[in-house]
Image (tube, rainbow, N blue to C red):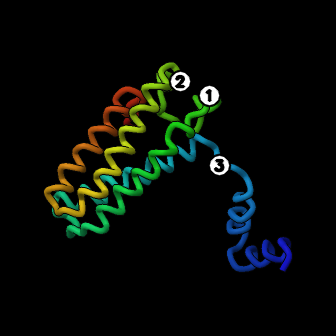
């Protein structure tokens, strides 16, 4: 089936919005939107999954905790690349200009999150207490970067 027929089928099945999504996949994503989505994913893994378990709101599941930490580790390898020089403004970004002034420190902090999340993925298999300690280490590493390189959110 030709590409035109695939797109036509997508329009028929998904409607106009679906066709827009199918065609948009051919375009690279804006780095600001990509990094905002990555950070949201990391926040969901860290706070909804892992913190939920450590606070007893979600039943503890070592495999899910490990997978969430592994996802954070994998995502963190892309953080530095999502801050190219031409992405300093737009899309309601909270990135501070200090990122581009001190790129080496910024990249080192992203690497630290990666290393701690990798270790956490392994240690979380040892039980809830290990997961609590791993959560604190990863959360502190995230905060260290956000404290230096992210502007506070404005209350609306």
Label 2 secondary element: helix
Q: Earlier in the sequence, mark 1 or mark 2?
A: 1
Residue marked by disc 3: 29
Residue 113, picture quadrant: top left
The extreme left residue here reads: 129
**Residue, x 51% and y 37% (percent of image)?**
80
Question: Quadrant of the image for the N terminus?
Answer: bottom right
Q: CA distance from mark 1 to mark 3?
A: 16 Å
Identify whether 43 is placed above or below 98. Answer: below
CB under 8 Å between discs 1 and 2: yes
Q: Earlier in the sequence, mark 2 or mark 3?
A: 3
Query: Which label is found at residue 7?
Result: none
Q: Earlier in the sequence, mark 1 or mark 3?
A: 3
Q: CA distance from mark 2 to mark 3?
A: 20 Å
The mark lying in front, picked from 2 and 3, is: 2
Q: Residue 60 in the image: x percent, y percent? A: 20, 67
Residue marked by disc 2: 100
Q: CA distance from mark 1 to mark 2?
A: 7 Å
Label 1 secondary element: loop
Query: Which label is found at residue 85?
Result: 1
Label 3 secondary element: loop
Q: Residue 67 in the image: x percent, y percent? A: 36, 63
**Residue, x 18% and y 49% (percent of image)?**
133
Identify whether 60 is placed above or below 45. Answer: below
Question: Quadrant of the image for the C terminus?
Answer: top left
Estimate how packed mark 1 is, as few (under 14), some (14 to 19) or many (20 or more) residues with alpha carbons within 10 Å: few
Identify whether 129 is placed above or below 103. Answer: below
Q: How many marks?
A: 3
87 left or right of 131 in image: right
* 91 and 65: which is toward the camera: 65
The extreme top residue here reads: 101
């Amino acid at each position: 089936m030709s590409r035109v027929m695939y797109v036509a089928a997508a329009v028929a099945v998904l409607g106009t919005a679906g066709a827009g999504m199918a065609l948009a996949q051919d375009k690279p994503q804006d780095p600001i939107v990509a990094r905002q989505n990555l950070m949201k994913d990391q926040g969901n893994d860290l706070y909804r999954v892992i913190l939920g378990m450590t606070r007893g709101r979600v039943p503890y599941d070592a495999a899910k905790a490990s997978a969430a930490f592994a996802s954070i580790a994998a995502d963190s390898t892309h953080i530095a690349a999502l801050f190219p020089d031409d992405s300093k403004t737009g899309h309601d970004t909270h990135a501070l200009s200090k990122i581009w002034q001190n790129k080496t420190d910024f990249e080192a902090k992203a690497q630290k999150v990666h290393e701690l999340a990798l270790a956490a993925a392994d240690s979380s298999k040892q039980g809830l207490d290990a997961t609590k300690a791993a959560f604190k280490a990863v959360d502190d590493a995230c905060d260290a970067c956000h404290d230096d390189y992210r502007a506070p959110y404005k209350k609306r």
